[in-house]
Amino acid sequence: KDSDEFLIIATTRPETMLGDTAVAVNPKDDRYKHLVGKTVILPILGRELPVIADQYVDMETGTGALKVTPSHDLNDYEIGKRHNLETINIFHENGTLNKNAGKKYVSLDRFDCRAALVKDLQSQQLLLKVVDHMHAVGHHDRCDQIIEPYISPQWYVNVKPLAERALEASKSGQITFIPDRETKRFHQWMEDILPWSISRQRWWGHRIPIWYCDDCHGITCTVETPDQCSNCGSENLKQDEDVLDTWFSSGLWPFSTMGWPEET
């Protein structure tokens, strides 16, 4: 911004630049130290992006300057949390572009948008080169569609207190692992445990026991189907359409086969 300098960015998903909210560089990278704290202008949309320093950036990958798209990349999301970056979702759930992508690209399929965006960058002489690059791309195991990281509201359970109890049981010798090498892996898993996302967008399963009030917009959580809102008493309730993780279903198996709810 307000300069003739520019940053060269390498990416395998050019369409996601429409959701960029920062450019990150490694704090030890002498090439970019003078740019940290300054602002760059995102091509096409003209959005102002801060240049931030983050240890995650690999100085040897690409140009060493990383476009940060918190809404559509897990690592970028973590960078975004550390630097309090805005999250801009550019996709609809069906993989087409939404209004955040800019008027020209709205409703385009993600891959059609990619082609159109590359063409526009070329026409504005902003595209340096296109090269083949070998990398891992996640595919769905059933339909083989390319998986698109996508930020959305979900329900989580804080499992850290349970993990701490399990870790202590292992360290105290109450439980042992065979073979013993699995002990170290278990400890790492428990020590690095993250909140568990328990909501799923599927057509079958146990419904999330959450009801939303159409009148006060309050939330009611109860095992039994409620007759009224726990906040305002309204009967205009709608249950969350998500279902629980399948572990909740499979976890019922030992109970249902061993006499629950009777004392057995």
Image: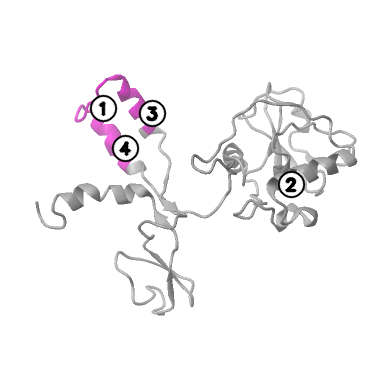
Residue type at mark 2: give it: Asp
Location of residue 181 in the rendering, given as x and y in whole percent from the top left corner: 31, 19
Examine the rendered structure and indicate whether residue 243 appears above or below residue 125: below
Q: Is residue 13 left or right of residue 39?
A: left
Residue 2 image-quadrant placement: top right
Residue type, mark 1 in image: Lys
Q: Earlier in the sequence, mark 3 or mark 4?
A: 4
Tell us which disc is closer to us: 3 or 1. Answer: 3
Marks 3 and 2: in contact by CB < 8 Å? no
Which residue: 39% across, 75% down?
229
Q: Is residue 21 visible?
A: no
What amino acid type should be assigned to the residue bearing mark 3?
Gln
- What is the quadrant of residue 121 in the picture? top right
Tell whether label 4 touches label 3 (CB within 8 Å).
Answer: no
Distance in Å between CA atoms under marks 2 and 3: 42 Å
> In this view, which residue lies farthest toward the front?
143
219 or 83: nearer the eye?
219
Q: Which residue is mark 1?
A: 171
- Residue pictured at 78% horizontal, 32% vertical: 35
User: Against 18, is 167 above or below?
Assistant: above
Q: Which disc, if any, is residue 164? A: 4
Kindly report which numbered mark, 1 or 2, lies closer to the viewer in this rendering: 2
Q: Is residue 182 magenta?
A: yes
N-term-proximal mark, 3 vs 1: 1
Q: Nearer the viewer, residue 198 or 7?
A: 198
Q: Magenta part of the protein: which range?
A: 162-189
Q: CA distance from mark 1 to mark 2?
A: 54 Å
Residue hosting label 3:
188
Q: Secondary structure at mark 3?
A: helix
Please name the residue shown 40% across and 50% down the image. 198
